[in-house]
Amino acid sequence: MSINIGIDLGTTNSCISYLEGSQLIIIPNPEGSRVIPSIVALTQDGKNIFGNIAKRQFITNNLNTIWGIKRLIGRKFQSDEANKMRQRIGYEISEAKNGDIKIHLGDKTYSAEEISGMFLKYLKQISEDYLGEKIGDSVITVPASFNDAQRQATKVAAEIAELNTSRIINEPTAALIAYRDKIKKNGLYAVYDFGGGTFDISIVEVNDEIYKVISTSGNTFLGGNDIDSKIIDWLLDEITKEIPIDISKHKNILQIILQKAEKAKIELSFNEETIISIPYLYHFPDGKDYHFQKKLTRVQLEHESVDIIDKTIELIKKSLEDINITPDQIEKTILVGGQSRMPLVSQKLYDYFKKTPYKDLNPEEVVAQGAAIQSNIIEGKLKDLLLLDVTSLSLGLETKDDTFTKIIERNTTIPTKKTMPFTTISDNQRTVKIHILQGERELSSQNKSLGYFILIGIPLAPKGIPQIEVTFEIDANGIVRVSARDKETHLSQSMKIQPSSGLSPEEIEEIILESKKHEEEDKIKLRITQLKNQLSEELETVKIFYRQHIDKLKLNEQNEIKNFIFRTEIALKEDNLDTLESLVSRMQTYKVKINNILISEFEN
Ligand SMILES: Nc1ncnc2c1ncn2[C@@H]1O[C@H](COP(=O)(O)OP(=O)(O)OP(=O)(O)O)[C@@H](O)[C@H]1O
Ligand SMILES: [Mg+2]
């Protein structure tokens, strides 16, 4: 029987969990980390490394150390978010032909889905090694406010990792599922999920075994990283007060500052002040070194980052207003995500809800735990609770004059489906183009374009006569599907959707094949190295024996061994797997022969 896992694929950290009996277990990586840095890197000698090991070389090899991929996935190169990321990262990104982001690693470029897929594959490997068996189903979590492009991209990453993923679920919802045993009272619960890269707030109505999300809101570019950025800006300011150098242009130094900033931020959750010290920060051409050291207090940090925390409170207000709920109606506010450990967060939440926020489970692990439970519920292995989630973004169409017409409003329970009639606007019109968008803004151009849907093969008819039914669907993963049917001909196969970005199914297939090919190559390389090591060790024994016992061997035996030594020495200089395998097996017969000679010698 295979084991199901839940994966919290985080911006900074990821976490894997599974259910053993009724116990939720976290799978640590080989370095023993329960919370695994979401980092993919390439070593100087061309090996892919992940997690803690990748994080360790972050400073020395920042050009080939990819972090924060979740902030890039499903986005365009020209987006504000990608632009902001570009100022901070040490690795290179560039624009793909379709406007997507290309990530440079070594001498190759990858899509964000591929990098995320490589990382998920590593998580899958860790899990299989830990459990000693194959993974069954997996549930992967995403921020509630992820749009369709980001969800699709995450699904593609899971495909690249060859994971069976039954569902993509929302992080705050997953977290609440993990709290199911702790929730004793029916009512409304607010899940405040503040991670490294994203913020989500979900209001959930708990009614015995039914968990119904009734409102959700968030920002996929608001998280701990942004508080780090505030500290970085402050540090850069302080540095320029002391030396006339623009450090932000020095990517490698910036990565050091980045790590120091995060460390200071975390320390200030426990202490009132901390010293940030960066010895040898800058080396001047005249040989002088600049060392940096400054005190940062919690008060100062709060002053720098209060507007970010206030943004999260604004989003809570919005999500409560959406459903006409007042803060006092909320039973408990549950803290999720590492950044929710900041004391100012609890204080602001207290001010708003007039109740101390609740945290009884590890905020960095609950999301993965909830995902593990959900995977078992989906597969029917666990009859626990019924989860009803909502879409966080409205889905609609572009109509006249850049107007955005909503078809499915946000906070609609998913899965959901809505059918709309369409017709032609000119005589004998054969095609209709439908532009699908997601978002809350009035103008189409201000919302996220999901792609064009082109109805083709409409029968010749005067305008307004053809009746085409277009069905808009959001599945349980929050992923959008659009299908159309001509009412008269019942034809539906002639319609096709053209994604505005992302990888095509053919490209995904190719990536999987390519990685399989390398997997095979890598295995062969490893086998060759192992065989060579074994062979060269054993060859030494044979050589010594040959030198010492040559006189006791028959002439044909002498020639045979000499020939074998000669062939082995040549094979050790080449990389031929078959030759090496056959020499290793020949070696075994020699070892037996040699042993026999030695034994008979000893007995005589
Ligand atoms: N004690 C602490 N005080 C303040 N911030 C903290 C503390 N511990 C961790 N963090 C911050 O929490 C963030 C990581 O949290 P978490 O692991 O929940 O995020 P993530 O799951 O990677 O991101 P996301 O959910 O946004 O994709 C980092 O920004 C980290 O600096
Ligand atoms: Mg998270």
Image (cartoon, grey):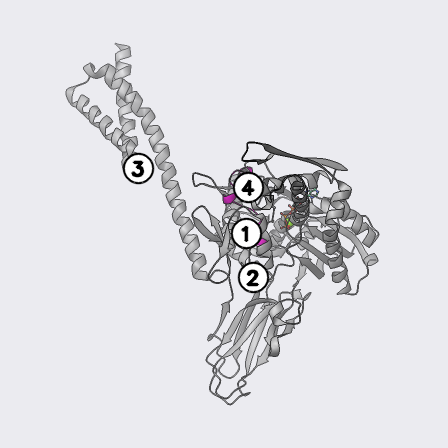
Q: Which residue is mark 1?
A: 137
According to the picture, the residue beneath numbered tag 2 turns out to be: 149
Residue 329: x and y, percent? 82, 58
Instruction: Please tell me the numbered disc located at residue 575.
Output: 3
* Disc 3 packing (10 Å; few <14; some 14–19; many ≥20): some
| x and y, in percent, of residue 323 in the image | 76, 65
Circles 1 and 3 in contact, beta carbons < 8 Å: no
Disc nearer the start of the sequence (2/3): 2
Q: Nearer the viewer, residue 180 or 242?
A: 242
Left or right of 273: which side holds 510? left
Question: What residue is shown at x 73% (from left), y 55% (from top)?
Answer: 312
Q: Nearer the viewer, residue 388 or 155?
A: 155
Which residue range is magenta in the image? 56-75
Q: Nearer the viewer, mark 1 or mark 2?
A: 2
Q: Quadrant of residue 273?
A: top right
The residue at 78%/50% (across/down) is 184
**Depth check, front residue: 21 or 211:** 211
Query: Which image quarter is the C terminus in?
Result: top left
| Residue 18 can be seen in this image | yes
Kindly report the distance in space between the C-alpha atoms of the residues bearing marks 1 and 3.
39 Å
